[in-house]
């Protein structure tokens, strides 16, 4: 059984209509102020930032997106005899699970945009329910359990990754025989370091990304072709 770990970043979801953040047409370049909407300290301190954040979530393509060929190819590999697949994703869109990956085999390093969490009592509920309240006129819906501030169940700038999730991801990276980083700039730490950890522990490192990454020189193979066609082809020849 070959353990294949796949670290996925924003680039894998662009074919599903979700813009990346740091690319030439990325959100942060189009609107530098938008970064404040997902920065914890700004979000907690400023009700206007929270109102704008809820409008951004309401208009987000991520919750309407469908899995693309790359997501489906990963799920197909997971069903292929002789392979054990684990997905370590920097994305919050849930498309790996919608594309057929069992949820227990997907580690969402940066959380999920499909749920909300109270910053006070930590109660979790669905994003769908929260957005229904926004549609009904609540500009900054509060936690129904304690009245606290609600946020998406994503890791905002200024927040730490869940140490349990990160620890599990590191364990998978160390154990992987093949480690594929796809659609990630490999610049956001500590998630990006998983590629280096895998290479240090003997994994065959493959990078599929349009632009150079800091880990390219460690890779056995670097693929610059479009992810939607390159990744399915790559997985078929593993």
Image (spheres, grey):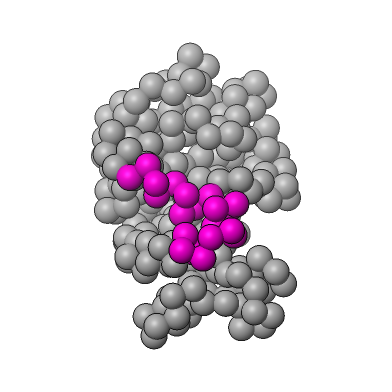
Which segment did they paint magenta?
A: 31-50
Which quarter of the figure has residue 190? top right
- Which quarter of the image is occupied by the C terminus? top left
Q: Is residue 201 left or right of residue 47?
A: right
229 is higher (above) or lower (below) than 198: below
Residue found at x 47% / y 49%: 36
Magenta highlight on residue 22: no
Q: From the image, give the main secondary structure of the stretch colored magenta.
A: helix
Residue found at x 59% / y 24%: 196
Residue 73 appears in the figure? no
Q: Is residue 201 left or right of residue 59?
A: right
Q: Is residue 9 left or right of residue 231?
A: right
| Residue 226 placement (x, y as % from top left) | 26, 35
Residue found at x 61% / y 83%: 144
Q: Is residue 134 left or right of residue 154?
A: left
Closest to the observer, 97 or 14: 14
Closest to the observer, 118 or 75: 118
Q: How many marks?
A: 0
| Residue 162 placement (x, y as % from top left) | 68, 50
């Amino acid at each position: 059984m070959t353990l294949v770990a796949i670290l996925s970043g924003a680039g894998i979801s662009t074919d599903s209509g979700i813009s990346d953040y740091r690319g030439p047409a990325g959100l942060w370049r189009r609107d530098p102020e938008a970064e404040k909407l997902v920065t914890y300290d700004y979000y907690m301190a400023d009700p206007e930032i929270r109102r704008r954040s809820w409008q951004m979530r309401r208009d987000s393509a991520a919750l309407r997106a469908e899995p693309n060929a790359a997501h489906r190819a990963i799920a197909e590999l997971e069903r292929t005899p002789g392979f054990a697949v684990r997905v370590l994703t920097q994305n919050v869109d849930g498309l790996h699970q919608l594309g057929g990956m069992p949820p227990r085999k997907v580690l969402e390093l940066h959380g999920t945009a499909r749920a909300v969490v109270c910053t006070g009592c930590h109660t979790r509920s669905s994003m769908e329910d929260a957005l229904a309240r926004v549609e009904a006129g609540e500009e900054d819906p509060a936690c129904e359990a304690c009245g606290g501030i609600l946020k998406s169940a994503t890791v905002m700038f200024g927040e730490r990754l869940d140490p349990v999730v990160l620890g599990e991801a590191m364990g998978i990276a160390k154990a992987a025989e093949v480690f594929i980083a796809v659609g990630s700039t490999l610049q956001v730490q500590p998630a990006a370091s998983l590629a280096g950890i895998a290479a240090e522990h003997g994994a065959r490192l493959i990078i599929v990304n349009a632009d150079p990454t800091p880990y390219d020189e460690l890779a056995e193979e670097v693929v610059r072709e479009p992810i939607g066609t390159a990744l399915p082809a790559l997985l078929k020849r593993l």
